Amino acid sequence: MSLRRHPGVALALLTALNFFNYIDRYVLPSVQPLVQKELHRSDADMGWLTSVFFAFYMCVAPFMGVLADRYPRKILIATGAVLWSGATLLTAVTTDYTSLLIRHTLVGIGEASFVTIAPAFIADLYPEHRRGRMLSIFYLAIPMGTAMGYVLGGHLGPVYGWRAPFMVAAIPGFLLAAALAFIPEPKRGNADVLTSTPERSTIVGLFHNPAYWTATLGTAMMTFALGGLSVWMPTFLSRVRGLPLNDANILFGEALIVAGFIATMLGGWLGDRLLRKNRSAYYLVSAVGMALALPFMVVALYHQGRLMFPAIFLALFFLLLNTGPLNAAIVNSVGAPIRATAIAVNVFTIHILGDVPSPPLIGYISDKTGSLPQGFIVAVVAVALSAAILFFGSRYAPQVPQHILDADKATA
């Protein structure tokens, strides 16, 4: 199989694996009240499950990035998929909080290999000016897989117990890992057109790369908000708004599927199209999306009337509009020699500042104030910071050569 002729096959396989990656990750929040009731744990304890996952996930990522810049990437991806799928399958036999912590540790280690390496793999299949669209397809798995995790847990958990959806979610990861063996390894830097510079292509230069760091910090603040909201929204809708847990999961999951699909695809297309006229398009589309999400977040979290449900949808839509362009901005800000390492540093940064602290912080504020909505204030602030950082970072966006953009426009 030639990746030059059929890059879409590799993209489809990696997207499918990413889809089940996020299903595995978000089955737990969908059954969280059931787990919490059985194990008699506080809100802060439940938040720490997610934090432990991301702590190991982000600590393993830099090592995976260094390995991926030196060794065959598909082997690392397949090994990680087998590990996280096996740990998810074993969740079916856990009976205590400590076992869940260990399960989250193993899943975090396995998923770190995939999420760190796959974007660099895809970057070697498509040139810079097409990566917004292609990474949108890959990252479409985030809202779709997350939503499916909620729907799967929402349907199976109340009927068959909270362990049942973990067994269903685990199997596809093994099959997709095996299929990856038939995909050839693309040459590093094969599709790049931007000039390689020390700032873009060396580890030392990476720490003096403002295009990379503003995109990374903007992503970190977005991750803080989305990480906290993803963990606590089904509980919020059930506990605070009075919806049955099954309905809360299905409502949030369906909103995430529809808003996530439209916003992710639109954001990638819009970023690539505007890049022909403005080198900062990836940053600006992301920044505008974050800014527009703010008022709808406030209504969704603090308004109890009919406007709450459309506000949830619109908040998710604008938060997820940046998925393709913002990840394309990160990938394009560095060259092929250090791309996997740079993505690994990005993963470490966005999680240590993002969804590692946010779920337990929201849970802690909820415990102290007796109000889960009070805990969401920190997520609203994080979205505002993300928009500000990305607007500032737009001045540092790299310029794709105009003749490449013109050629792409002519063949579009």
Image: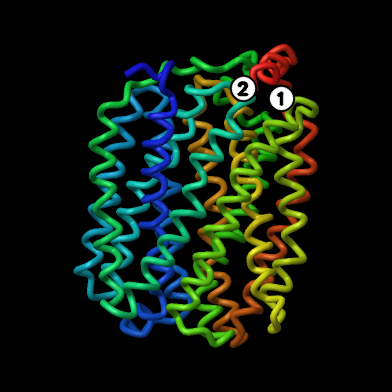
Name the N-terminal-most of marks 1 and 2. 2
Q: Please state the horizontal and vertical placement of residue 90, each as a whole percent of the image.
A: 21, 61
Q: Quadrant of residue 174?
A: top left
Residue shown at 71%/31% (left/top)?
273
- Residue topped by disc 1: 398
* In contact (CB < 8 Å): disc 1 and disc 2: yes
Q: Please state the horizontal and vertical placement of residue 142, each as a whole percent of the image.
A: 49, 51
Is disc 2 placed on a helix, strand or loop? helix
Seen in the picture, residue 140 relative to 373 is either above or below; the reply is above
Q: Please state the horizontal and vertical placement of residue 291, each as a whole percent of the image.
A: 77, 55
- Residue topped by disc 2: 200
Seen in the picture, residue 69 relative to 93 is either above or below; the reply is above
Q: Quadrant of residue 236?
A: bottom right
Residue shown at 42%/53% (left/top)?
22
Residue shown at 72%/39% (left/top)?
283
Seen in the picture, residue 85 relative to 402 is either above or below; the reply is below
**Is 401 displayed left or right of 148 in the figure?**
right
Query: For the N terminus, which image quadrant?
Result: top left
Give the class, few, some or many, for how many residues have Cα within 10 Å of label 2's Cα (few <14, many ≥20): many
Give the class, few, some or many, for how many residues have Cα within 10 Å of label 1's Cα (few <14, many ≥20): some
| Label placed on residue 89 | none
The amino acid type found where label 2 is placed reads: Arg
The amino acid type found where label 1 is placed reads: Pro
Residue shown at 40%/19% (left/top)?
3
Indicate which label's residue lies in the foreground, 1 or 2. Answer: 1
Could you tell me how far apart the alpha carbons at marks 1 and 2 are, in whole angstroms? 10 Å
**Is 131 displayed left or right of 337 in the figure?**
right
